[in-house]
């Protein structure tokens, strides 16, 4: 019993000594002997690419199209020869031929007979225009109506005439106008009870047509297109049987000019009339207005033809 008591006293004495050791010494000894595990980085951050200075738009030199002159060359640039010598050949190796208008019409008629297609199919022309003017100005896309010497439509256009004069309205109806009248026609047009191909107006009535601007849009009467005037009979004569065409995709005119069953002379006469009217929309001093002309029918291939400029433009140049 006495031995057990002595052992317990020794244990308590050792514990008491251990508790009396200063905390500062124990922390110092631990910090000096403990191994330090500091984070390390074995890579470097990528350098940011230097910002490229923006070039001023004014200093950039515009690339100009390469103009190739094939005059006096034994073959055109990029092709095998001027024309093929065999009956069977690859078309991409030779420049597309340019035909005389009469020859092109004869070819369209022969295509129709070979393919056994309808002889009454329409004939189209596709004109590419040079819309450039002086400096950076361009010709605005236009809409025009021309009287063809040989009309191909079976029905006349519906023409409406705006006028407050009952005598003028009666005269217009007697000469082929589908509708004629004043403000009483405006609600009927807005409700689509009346629909016409062309809307004509006398100058004194044009200010009362503002409610129809959003409804008619391109068909709204404008003096620029000859839809506003005093001579109603002259306007009716043009727009009853007139043929309308417009500029699409900035510089193209694609329009019908005839049907394939019409005589060759009638097709050529309509073709020349449309070309002459197109050339009036730009001054002749700027050079040829039409850059390329193509003729085709509804089922045939397109044929490029050499158009003839009006005699007036040739004198002006």
Image (cartoon, helix red, strand yellow):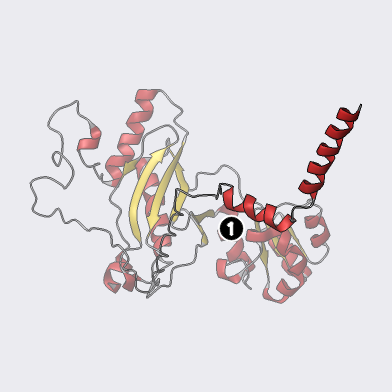
Disc 1 crowd rating (10 Å Cα; few below 14, some 14-19, many 20+) is many
**Front in this rendered view, residue 149 or 35:** 35
Q: Is residue 4 visible to us here?
A: yes
Q: How many circles with numbers are drawn on the protein?
A: 1
**Front in this rendered view, residue 256 or 210:** 210
Q: In the figure, is residue 247 to the left or right of 135?
A: right
Measured along the vertical axis of the image, is residue 139 above or below residue 23?
below
Residue at label 1? 239
Measured along the vertical axis of the image, is residue 44 above or below residue 142?
above
Q: In the figure, is residue 240 to the left or right of 168?
A: left
Q: x and y percent of residue 252 in the render?
A: 44, 54
**Front in this rendered view, residue 262 or 61:** 61
* Quadrant of the rendered image containing residue 262: top left
Which residue reaches farthest front?
Answer: 2
- The residue that appears at 44% across and 59% down in the rendered structure is 48
Q: Is residue 149 visible to us here?
A: no
Q: x and y percent of residue 113 in the render?
A: 36, 26
What secondary structure is found at the residue carrying circle 1?
helix
**Front in this rendered view, residue 23 or 205:** 23
């Amino acid at each position: 019993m006495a031995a057990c008591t002595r052992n317990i006293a020794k244990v308590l004495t050792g514990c008491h000594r251990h508790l009396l050791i200063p905390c500062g010494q124990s922390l110092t000894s631990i910090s000096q002997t403990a191994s330090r595990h500091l984070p390390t980085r074995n890579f470097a951050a990528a350098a940011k690419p230097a910002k490229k200075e923006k070039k001023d738009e004014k200093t950039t030199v515009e690339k100009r199209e390469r103009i190739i002159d094939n005059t006096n060359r034994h073959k055109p640039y990029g092709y095998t020869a001027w024309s093929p010598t065999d009956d069977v050949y690859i078309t991409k190796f030779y420049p597309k031929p340019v035909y005389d208008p009469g020859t092109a019409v004869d070819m369209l008629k022969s295509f129709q007979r070979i393919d056994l297609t309808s002889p009454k199919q329409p004939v189209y022309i596709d004109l590419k225009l040079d819309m450039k003017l002086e400096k950076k100005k361009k010709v605005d896309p236009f809409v025009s109506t021309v009287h063809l010497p040989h009309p191909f439509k079976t029905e006349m256009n519906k023409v409406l005439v705006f006028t407050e004069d009952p005598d003028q309205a009666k005269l217009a109806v007697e000469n082929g106008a589908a509708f004629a009248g004043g403000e009483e026609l405006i609600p009927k047009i807005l409700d689509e009870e009346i629909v016409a191909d062309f809307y004509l107006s006398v100058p004194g009535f044009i200010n009362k047509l503002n409610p129809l601007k959003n409804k008619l849009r391109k068909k709204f009467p404008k003096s620029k297109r000859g839809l506003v005037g005093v001579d109603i009979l002259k306007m009716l004569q043009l727009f009853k049987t007139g043929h309308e065409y417009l500029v699409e995709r900035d510089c193209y005119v694609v329009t019908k000019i005839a049907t394939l069953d019409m005589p060759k002379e009638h097709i050529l006469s309509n073709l020349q009339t449309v070309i002459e009217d197109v050339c009036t929309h730009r001054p002749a001093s700027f050079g040829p207005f039409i850059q390329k002309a193509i003729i085709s029918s509804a089922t045939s291939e397109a044929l490029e033809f050499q158009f003839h400029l009006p005699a007036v433009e040739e004198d002006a140049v």
